[in-house]
Every structure is written in C-alpha cells, then in structure tokens.
Amino acid sequence: DAETRAFGEALLRRMKAWCVERGVGLYLVSLYHFNYPPGVYAWLEPVAKVAAIPFLDLQRPIAEAIGGDRAGHFITGDYHPNERTNALVAGRTWAWLRPMLEGDVARHAQHP
C-alpha cells in the first residue's frame, strides 16, 4: 500500500545517505517467493534509480528458473526456500554484484 511504499522509500533514502557518509556501497536485491505476484517489486526500481542504488529484481528470473517445482525448491510445509533456490539466487546475485564490487575496490584503492 502507499504507506508501506512511502516508508520503504524513506528507508532506502536514509540507508543511501548513511552509506555515502561512510564511503560504503549499497546494493539492493529482491527476494523471491512463489506467493509473490510478478512485478511485486516493480515499485522499487524507480525508487532505487532516483536514489542511485543498483537494484536487481529476482522475482521473475527465479520464478522462471524454478517453473512449477515448488517441492524441489522450498522446504516442505515451511514455504522457505531450500538450498536449490538459494543457490539460484546466489548465482544470479553474484554474477550481477561482482563487477560492481570489483569496481568499488579499484576506486577505493586509488582514493583510500
């Protein structure tokens, strides 16, 4: 709802300011859950863009990778992702995040 989104936006702006003050990078990655509808995180993309926070939305790509195999990707009776889903998330996150982290490290080395 609008109040939750406004709170989320304010939180992201504050987190970004805190990180900038300390020279720390901030990256935003969505979580995946089969109960979330496609586009559930779409509102975050423009917010992150305005705040200059790199954002990776994993809802659709992980849903597509899993297909309908909930039993193979979630803890039975618990609905939390299991190691297979976490491996998919980690692999996609690392492929996206690694180049940015390497760039941050290189910039920090030049200007400590």
Image (cartoon, rainbow, N blue to C red):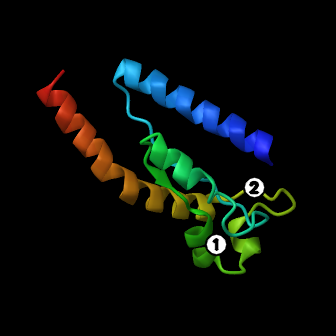
How far across and down, in percent of the image, does residue 34 sit?
74, 67
Instruction: State the mark number for residue 80.
Output: 2
The residue at which mark 1 appears reads as: 63
Would you say 27 lies left or right of 107 here? Answer: right
Would you say 30 lies left or right of 80 here? Answer: left
Nearest to the observer: residue 1 or residue 18: 1
Q: Residues within 10 Å of mark 1 (few under 14, many from 20)?
A: some
Please, what is the three-letter code of the amino acid marked with disc 2? His
Nearest to the observer: residue 23 or residue 83: 23
How far across and down, in percent of the image, does residue 16 sit?
48, 31
Image height of 62 relative to 83, above or below: below
Compare marks 1 and 2 and give the one earlier in the sequence: 1
All told, the count of numbered labels is: 2
The residue sitting at the left extreme is: 110
Seen at 39% across and 19% down, the residue is 21
Would you say 106 lies left or right of 10 here? Answer: left
Image height of 33 relative to 28, above or below: below
Rounded to the nearest angstrom, the CA distance separating label 1 from label 2 is 14 Å
Would you say 27 lies left or right of 32 here? Answer: left
- Residue 35: name its quadrant: bottom right
Nearest to the observer: residue 90 or residue 15: 15
Seen at 47% across and 39% down, the residue is 51
The residue sitting at the right extreme is: 77
The C terminus - image quarter: top left
Please, what is the three-letter code of the amino acid marked with disc 1? Ala
Seen at 53% across and 64% down, the residue is 88
How far across and down, in percent of the image, does residue 100 sit?
31, 47
- The label nearer to you, 1 versus 2, is 1
Seen at 80% across and 59% down, the residue is 79
**Secondary structure beneath label 2:** loop
